[in-house]
Image (cartoon, rainbow, N blue to C red):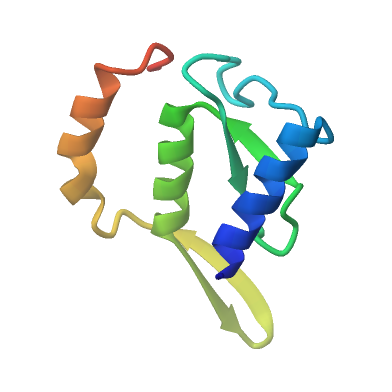
Amino acid sequence: MDKKEHARRLMTQAIERGDLVRKPCERCGATEPTVHGHHEDYDRPLDVVWLCQYHHLIRHNELARMVTFTVNGIAYTKFGWYGFEEHLNDFDKFRDSVPCWE
């Protein structure tokens, strides 16, 4: 089992036991459709960001555009639009099905 699956399983078990409680989307406050627990770090499986389906998709696209590089021991992060155009049709379809579209 990879880290991603392991983190999901631990999160799900914690929710089922009541140790972790779903919260509204941290970006728009939506509670429906189901709010997802997004892992920024799979080594911290119970440290999740609660996001609605739309904002979860947006977060993954933000991460896909993020490039980190190091110069003289200093880490820099750059955001680009690499490959983003390919997903615009998916966003158009998705926008119509999500109640919290901004």
Which of the pair 58/10 is nearer the observer? 10
Quadrant holding the N terminus? bottom right
Q: From this viewpoint, is residue 40 visible?
A: no
Q: Quadrant of the C terminus?
A: top left
Q: Position of residue 22 (x, y in %)?
A: 69, 26
Q: Is residue 80 left or right of residue 30?
A: left
Image coords of residue 87 (percent x, y): 22, 45
Q: Which residue is drawn at 24% across and 57% down?
A: 83
Q: Which of 32 and 85 is in front in this view?
A: 32
Left or right, 19 with respect to 48, comes to right
Question: Is the residue 64 above or below the residue 14 in the image?
Answer: below
x and y percentages locating residue 76 in the rendered image: 59, 69
Residue drawn at 17 percent across, 50 percent down: 86
In the rendered image, the vertical position of residue 43 relative to residue 10, given as above or below? below
State the residue at coordinates (44%, 29%): 53
The part of the image, by quadrant, that contains residue 51 is: top right
Q: Can residue 19 be seen in this view?
A: yes
Looking at the image, residue 59 lies above or below residue 94: below
